[in-house]
């Protein structure tokens, strides 16, 4: 099946710094990618939808200037958490929708961000 | 998106069948019923989806009520690796592409 990877799997950064998380579709072209965050014992919350070559669409309440999303190619989307604070510590998960099947999204393994 | 309601948690024994219910009384005629599951510390994975008829695949079966206001995900013979949070999600293929996750059902499998 289709594989989505994320890098890094874990990252610890200091408060005030920026962190970039990469999401790649390894064996298919992803026209649309999604970014979620998940706090412990909670469900996934959609942050934004990114389409290749265009600006991301952010969900209500998500700061676009804080969570920068770039979908520069059909296989790569990046999420940059700028000026990170401890409350940004979370599990960030991306997913990708291929060109063909509308019904299935492929999720990455997630990135655990800890801001100290 | 129409809302789904699932029990917070369920428990079953290894090698026994598991029936995970989902209520979606406000489902529209074009909504498909999707199931995803999330194993601990991993991203979710697709399980199955259907519209009106019951569906089977290698992972599970999906039984859809005749009025489509509820559905049941069936794991025919649970293993310890099936312990996960199971999410029932409605999605219209003509609408937004995004998946909106509810709270899901945390399934525990006892050895």
Image (spheres, coloured by chain):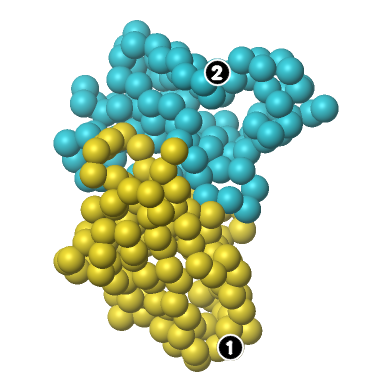
The residue at 18%/66% (across/down) is A53
> Which one is nearer the viewer's eye here, A71 or A69?
A71
Quarter of the image for residue A72 reads bottom left
Which residue is identified by label 1?
A14
- Secondary structure, mark 1, is loop
The residue at 38%/49% (across/down) is A27
Chain A colour is yellow
Number of the label disc, if any, that sits on residue B74 = 2
Furthest toward the right, the residue is B111
- Left or right: where A17 falls relative to A35: right
Q: Which quadrant holds the C terminus of chain B? A: top right
Chain B colour is cyan
- Left or right: where B63 falls relative to A98: right
Determine whether B104 is above or below A90 in the image. Answer: above
Determine whether A9 is above or below B22 in the image. Answer: below
- Left or right: where A114 falls relative to A7: right
Q: Position of residue B65 (x, y in %)?
A: 39, 12
């Amino acid at each position: 099946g289709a594989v989505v990877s994320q890098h890094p799997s874990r990252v610890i950064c200091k408060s005030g710094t920026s962190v970039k998380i990469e999401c790649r579709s390894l064996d298919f072209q992803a026209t649309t990618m999604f970014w979620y965050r998940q706090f412990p014992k909670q469900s996934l919350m959609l942050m934004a939808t990114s389409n290749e070559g265009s600006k991301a669409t952010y969900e209500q309440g998500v700061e676009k200037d804080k969570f920068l999303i770039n979908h520069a190619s059909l296989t790569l989307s990046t999420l940059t958490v700028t000026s990170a604070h401890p409350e940004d510590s979370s599990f960030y998960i991306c997913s990708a929708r291929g060109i063909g099947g509308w019904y299935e999204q492929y999720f990455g393994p997630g990135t655990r961000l800890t801001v100290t | 998106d129409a809302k789904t309601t699932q029990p917070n948690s369920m428990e079953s024994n290894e090698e026994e069948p598991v029936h995970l219910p989902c209520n979606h009384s406000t489902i529209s005629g074009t909504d498909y019923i999707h199931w995803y599951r999330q194993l601990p510390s991993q991203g979710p994975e697709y399980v199955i989806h259907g519209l009106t008829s019951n569906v089977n695949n290698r992972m599970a079966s999906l039984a859809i009520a005749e009025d489509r206001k509820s559905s049941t995900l069936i794991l025919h013979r649970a293993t310890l690796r099936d312990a996960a949070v199971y999410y029932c999600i409605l999605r219209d293929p003509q609408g937004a592409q995004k998946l909106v996750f509810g709270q899901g059902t945390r399934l525990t499998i006892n050895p």
